[in-house]
Image (cartoon, rainbow, N blue to C red):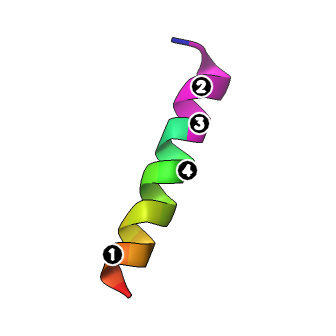
Amino acid sequence: ITLAGLFVTAYLQYRRGDQLDL
């Protein structure tokens, strides 16, 4: 697992959570 991969994963989860929240 790379730092960039972890950042992307967290970003995707954030967007996914935001979409579910909407």
In percent of the image, x 60 and y 38: which residue is there? 8
Q: Is residue 11 above or below residue 7?
A: below
Give, as a three-letter code, the residue at label 3.
Answer: Phe
Q: What residue range appears in magenta?
A: 2-8
Q: Residues within 10 Å of mark 1 (few under 14, many from 20)?
A: few
Location of mark 3 (residue): 7
The nearer-to-camera label among 2 and 1 is 1
Location of mark 1 (residue): 20
- Marks 2 and 3: CB-CB under 8 Å? yes
Which callout, 2 or 4, points at the residue further toward the start of the chain?
2
The nearer-to-camera label among 1 and 4 is 1
Whether residue 21 appears in magenta in the rendering, the answer is no
> What label sits on residue 11 in the rendered view?
4
Q: Is residue 17 above or below residue 2?
A: below
Cα distance in 3D space between marks 1 and 4:
14 Å
In percent of the image, x 59 and y 14: which residue is there? 2
Which callout, 3 or 1, points at the residue further toward the start of the chain?
3
Pinpoint residue 20: horizontal percent, then vertical percent: 33, 75
Location of mark 2 (residue): 5
